[in-house]
Amino acid sequence: MPKIPPNEGAPHGLSSLRRAGRVTEVLFLNEIALHPHTRLRPIARSLGVTVQAVSQLHRALSRRGWVQLVDGVYRPTVRGTAALHEALTSVRTDVDDRLGRLRVVGRTRAIARRSVRAGEQVLLSMEEGVLSARPGARGASRGRAVHPARSGDLVEVEALEGILPMRPAPVRCLVLPTRPSSGAALAADLRAHLRTRAYAVLAAEGLEAFHLMRRCTSAAVARFGVAAVCREASQMGVSVLVVVTEERLPAFLQRLSEPTPVAPVDLETLGERSTATR
């Protein structure tokens, strides 16, 4: 399933919650993602609304393909989980951006990519997830070297000016379905993803996901602290591919969002494309 694209020009962040019923939608999806419910009444009690309101909301979200009833338990679909994460990410990113504009950083450390002299003006950039400094006076982010440093050494930089250009890299999240149609299709789809792009970080959440990863690549695969690894790599602009079992997806996305900053996520269900081309 591809990522749900935002509507062009549509409100985002805090502004997106002003639409009538939007907050309740997000809270409903969050409630059933984190807690098993077999009846609507406890959900209504948790949200502070009537059972009738929750029933209407459930029907509306079902028509969108965002919620499902699995073995008598209300659960978000993969598409619903993606919509929830997108909504929470949008709000949190907006809040982080507002708070970030209030903070002032006066000094930092970087890797010198060329030799610099004490007091020399340097330009700052993020390269492969590493803050880097080069001699120069014109750029989006700049400062002054506190001490001399050779290429490859750490250099302390003060008198910071401007804003460091740094775009978080999306976490490519491939969902391993609970009831896959074909193990061969899953492996073929994953290998296709690995061939399409050279990801700097590979990770797996869940034993089944890790087992599939080991079948498809000889590269190192992060298995522990996966959400923290993915979040930090993403915020440093480093490409990430993670395979997550469907039952672990809601909890994984929750951990991916805490603490801030929030990592952007592209969700897709493994095996769908391979099955479609048969």
Image: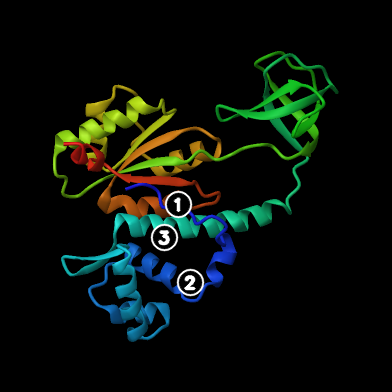
Answer above or below: position of 183 versus 1: above
Regarding residue 63, the answer to whether it shows in the image is: yes
- CA–CA distance in space, label 3 to label 1: 13 Å
Residue 233 spot, x, y in % from top left: 49, 36
Callout 2: 10 Å neighbours few (<14), some, many (20+)?
few
In the picture of the structure, the residue carrying the numbered disc 2 is: 23
Viewer-closest of 272 and 123? 272
Q: Residue furthest right?
A: 119
The amino acid beneath tag 3 is Leu
**Left or right placement of residue 122 versus residue 201 in this view:** right
How packed mark 3 is, by other alpha carbons closer than 10 Å (few <14, some 14-19, many 20 or more), is: many
CA gap between label 2 and label 3 equals 11 Å
Secondary structure found at label 2: helix
Decide which of 124, 22 is in the foreground and name it: 22
Which residue appears at 83% of the width and 20% of the height?
A: 118
**Residue 84 image label:** 3
Separation of disc 1 and disc 2 at Cα?
Answer: 19 Å
Residue at the spot of label 1 = 5
- Residue 33's place in the image compared with 111, above or below, is below
Please tell me which residue is depicted at 30% across the width and 68% down the height of the picture.
63
Mark 3 or mark 1, earlier in chain:
1
Return the x and y of residue 189 as percentages of the image width and height: 25, 34
Circle 1 crowding by C-alpha within 10 Å: few under 14, some 14–19, many from 20:
few
Q: Which label lies toward us, 1 or 2?
A: 1
Residue 197 x, y percent position in the rendering: 40, 27
What residue lies at 80% left-to-right and 28% top-to-bottom?
138
Residue 225 in view, yes or no: no
**At label 1, which amino acid type do we have?**
Pro
Amino acid type at mark 2: Val
Residue 134 picture quarter: top right
